[in-house]
Image (cartoon, rainbow, N blue to C red):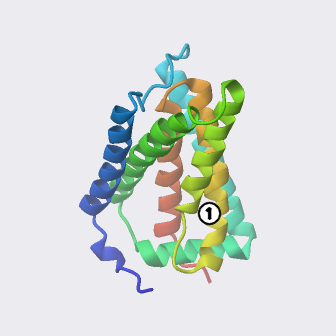
Amino acid sequence: MTQVPAQKIGVGIVISFYGVMAAVGYFFSWIFDINPLVLRESSNSLWFRMLIGGGFGIGVVLVSALFTHKFYWAKRLSETLRNTLGRRNFVEIFFFALASGLGEEILFRGTLQQLLTMVLFDGVAANIFGVVVAAVIFGVLHTGPERAVFFPWTIFAIVVGALLGLLYWWTGDLVAPVTAHFTINFFNLHLICNRDAID
C-alpha cells in the first residue's frame, strides 16, 4: 500500500477527519438521547480532572519513550510513524493532538462506551463491558499497512483506551480523558516527528 506523502496531510485535513468523527459521535448521541461529554455530574473540580488527565498522559508518554529506548519493535514503529508523518512544527502538532483528542474521545468514550453500557448488562458489569469493548474497537483502528510493525501499537492503544475509559467512568465526563489524550499525542508526536532518525 502506498503511503500518502507527509507534506500532503495538512492541519485542515486532520481537523476535518476528527471533526467528522466527533460529528458521528454526536449524531448517535442525539439518536439515543445521551450526552457524550458528561456521563454524570462530577464532584471534582475542573482543574483536578485536568490534572488527573494530564498526569496520566505524561505517564503514558514516559512509558512510550521507555519502550522506544529499550525495544526494537517500538523503535521500528516510531521510525515508521516518523516516515509517514514527516517533520511537524509546534502548531501542527498542537492541532493534531487537540483534534484527535476531542474527536476520538467524543466518539469512543463519550458515545460508544456509554451506548455499550446499555446493551447487555447492568451495574458494574455494564460499565466494564463498555470500557473493554470500546477500547478494543479503538485499538483495532490504530493500525497500518505493515501489520507486523503496527501490531504493538494496536495492543498499546487497546490498553490505553481501556484506561481512558476508566478515567471517563471514574471522573464522570470527558475532561480527564481528553486532557490525557491530548497530552499523549502532543508529546509523542514531538518525540516521533522531530527527533533524529533512529539508526
Give the residue drawn at x 53%, y 58%.
188
Above or below, 112 relative to 15:
above
In this view, the residue in front, 31 or 166, is: 31
Extreme-front residue of the structure: 120
Q: Secondary structure beneath disc 1?
A: helix
Q: Is residue 163 left or right of residue 3?
A: right
Q: Which quadrant is home to the C terminus?
A: bottom right
Give the residue drawn at x 40%, y 74%.
86
Extreme-left residue of the structure: 12
Give the residue drawn at x 32%, y 57%.
17
Q: Quadrant of residue 88?
A: bottom left
Q: Is residue 117 left or right of residue 104?
A: right
Extreme-right residue of the structure: 70
In this view, the residue in front, 44 or 21, is: 21
User: What is the x, y in percent for residue 106?
Assistant: 42, 40
Above or below, 60 relative to 188:
above
In this view, the residue in front, 114 or 198, is: 114
Extreme-bottom residue of the structure: 2
* Whether residue 31 can be seen here: yes
User: What is the x, y in percent for residue 157?
Assistant: 61, 56
Give the residue drawn at x 58%, y 36%.
119
Q: Which residue is mark 1?
A: 154
Q: Amino acid at mark 1?
A: Thr
In this view, the residue in front, 51 or 25, is: 25
* Whether residue 61 can be seen here: no
